[in-house]
Structure formats: structure tokens, C-alpha cells
Image: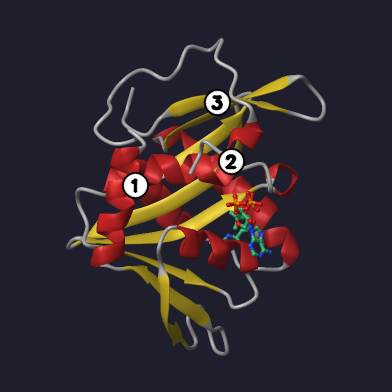
């Protein structure tokens, strides 16, 4: 099992438990990601990722890209890449019905170990009004360091935030303390039930 993959059972409103599984992106996930982009960003009038980048993520950059599945249905994803010891986390998204259920923490918990030995910094961009994403970046130790004008087109502004070298070291120490690094072991047995409220995903 690749590093970062994992399974969690969480309570769902419809069924007693729902199996949430996070794994690295695979070549066959292309259509699922395009569909999720449409569902999460397209329907609210935002632009969606181009197929070329999504194909690159699925086929070449998947060491740092993750997909979460709920009972085998794709529900969330994190896309990013590493270049010259800098990580760029380009997309983090959860389908609306699963937002607020800490799935995003599972993706982050898979992502951090995948980059932590390879980078000195990690970069994000975010819209000013996106409180959830900004809070997540801050919780990882990122600081907002600037604003990019005309990012995806004229008038499109993005806040740039960065987990700098010191913050990467702090993040690493936290993951080490929690025993979340350096493990390359099978996912927990499928009988394991982890209550959401325990907050173990951070
Ligand atoms: C950003 C996103 C991935 C966060 O996932 P989520 O399931 O909504 O996040 P959660 O509700 O589990 O909250 C994650 C953290 O952010 C905080 N948070 C959530 N909404 C917030 C808000 N509006 N303001 C401040 N903090 C907020 C929560 O307190 C939580 O921290 P905690 O787990 O320590 O309590 C999700 O909202 C999403 O997919 N949005 C649409 C796509 C998007 O905009 N992606 C980001 C840019 S690529």
C-alpha cells in the first residue's frame, strides 16, 4: 500500500458507518476528478481545472495527489506537485454533502508525509472569501504572504500563502510526535471504527 493511503470508518447520517478511503491518484481517476471539479466548482460558476493538468496529476504527479472515496465513491481530492524543494498544493476540494466531516483532514494527513522530506516550503493560493480553505492553510502553519492579481484572468485575485521552512519543520515534528511519518504499513483492519469526534485526523 502506498504511503499516505488509509481507511477510516465514519458515522454517516444514512448508514451506521461509511468507509472513507484515501489513496494516491491513479491514471483511471481522470474522469472522476473532472466530474468532481464540475460538481464542486463548476456548478457554483467557478472555473474548473483543464483536462491537461488533471491528466498530468493522474499519470505523472500522483505521488503528491490524493483521492478520497466514501464507500468507493470519489468524494474529495487534493492535487499538487513538487518542484525544486517547493510544494505547490493546487487544489483541495470536498463534495458539498461531505464537507464539514473532516474528510479534508484525511487528505492532508496523506499529503503531508508525501512532501515533508522533499520540500523546504509549501505554497497555496486562495480566494479572500474562502474562509474554510484559509483556516486549513493557517492550521498547517501557512502564513499569507501576498496577493496575485489577474491570477486566472483579469480581475481574479488570489491570496498566496506559504508554509515556510520553520513551519515545515514544526509540521514535521508534529507528524513525528503523532507517529504519522515513516510508516509504510497496511491500512488499519477494516473492522476498525474511528469516531469522527476524536479529532484524530490532524
Ligand atoms: C475548503 C474545503 C476543502 C474544506 O473542507 P470542509 O470539509 O469544508 O472543511 P471542514 O468543515 O472539515 O473544516 C476544516 C477546518 O476549517 C475550519 N473552517 C471551516 N469552514 C470555515 C469557515 N467558513 N471559516 C473559518 N474556518 C472554517 C473548520 O473549523 C475546520 O477546522 P477543524 O477541523 O480544526 O475544526 C471545502 O470547503 C471545499 O471543498 N470547498 C470548495 C472547494 C474549495 O474552495 N477549495 C479550496 C480552494 S482549491
61 sits to left or right of 52 = left
Question: How far across and down, in percent of the image, does residue 100 sit?
Answer: 69, 47
> What is the quadrant of the N terminus in the image?
top left
| Coloration mode | secondary structure
Looking at the rendered structure, the secondary structure element under dot 3 is strand
> As displayed, is residue 132 above or below residue 174?
below
Does any atom of ligand 1 lie closer than 8 Å to the CB of label 2? yes
Residue drawn where x is 56% and y is 83% of the image: 156
Residue 180 as seen in the image, left or right of residue 46? left
What is the residue that sits farthest to the right in this orientation?
A: 14
Instruction: Give the residue pinned by disc 3.
Output: 8
Check disc 1 and report the residue beneath it: 174
**At x 81% / y 30%, what residue is drawn?**
13
Q: Position of residue 54 (x, y in %)?
A: 45, 52
Label 1 with label 3: CB-CB less than 8 Å: no
Instruction: For residue 30, say whether it is visible.
Output: no
Q: Residues within 10 Å of mark 3 (few under 14, many from 20)?
A: many
Q: Label 2, on which residue? A: 103
Amino acid at each position: 500500500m502506498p504511503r499516505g493511503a488509509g481507511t477510516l470508518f465514519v458515522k454517516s447520517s444514512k448508514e451506521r458507518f461509511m468507509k472513507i478511503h484515501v489513496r494516491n491518484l491513479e491514471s483511471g481517476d481522470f474522469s472522476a476528478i473532472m466530474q468532481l471539479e464540475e460538481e464542486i466548482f463548476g456548478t457554483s460558476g467557478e472555473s474548473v481545472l483543464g483536462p491537461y493538468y488533471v491528466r498530468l496529476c493522474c499519470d505523472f504527479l500522483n505521488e503528491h495527489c490524493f483521492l478520497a472515496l466514501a464507500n468507493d465513491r470519489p468524494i474529495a481530492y487534493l492535487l499538487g506537485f513538487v518542484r525544486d524543494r517547493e510544494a505547490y498544493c493546487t487544489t483541495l476540494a470536498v463534495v458539498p454533502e461531505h464537507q464539514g466531516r473532516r474528510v479534508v483532514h484525511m487528505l492532508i494527513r496523506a499529503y503531508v508525509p508525501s512532501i515533508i522530506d522533499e520540500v523546504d516550503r509549501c505554497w497555496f493560493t486562495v480566494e479572500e472569501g474562502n474562509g474554510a480553505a484559509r483556516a486549513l492553510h493557517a492550521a498547517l502553519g501557512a502564513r499569507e504572504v501576498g496577493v496575485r492579481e489577474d491570477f486566472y484572468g483579469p480581475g481574479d485575485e488570489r491570496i498566496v500563502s506559504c508554509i515556510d521552512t520553520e513551519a515545515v519543520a514544526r509540521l514535521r515534528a508534529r507528524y513525528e510526535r503523532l507517529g504519522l511519518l515513516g510508516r509504510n504499513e497496511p491500512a488499519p483492519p477494516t473492522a476498525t471504527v474511528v469516531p469522527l469526534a476524536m479529532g484524530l485526523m490532524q
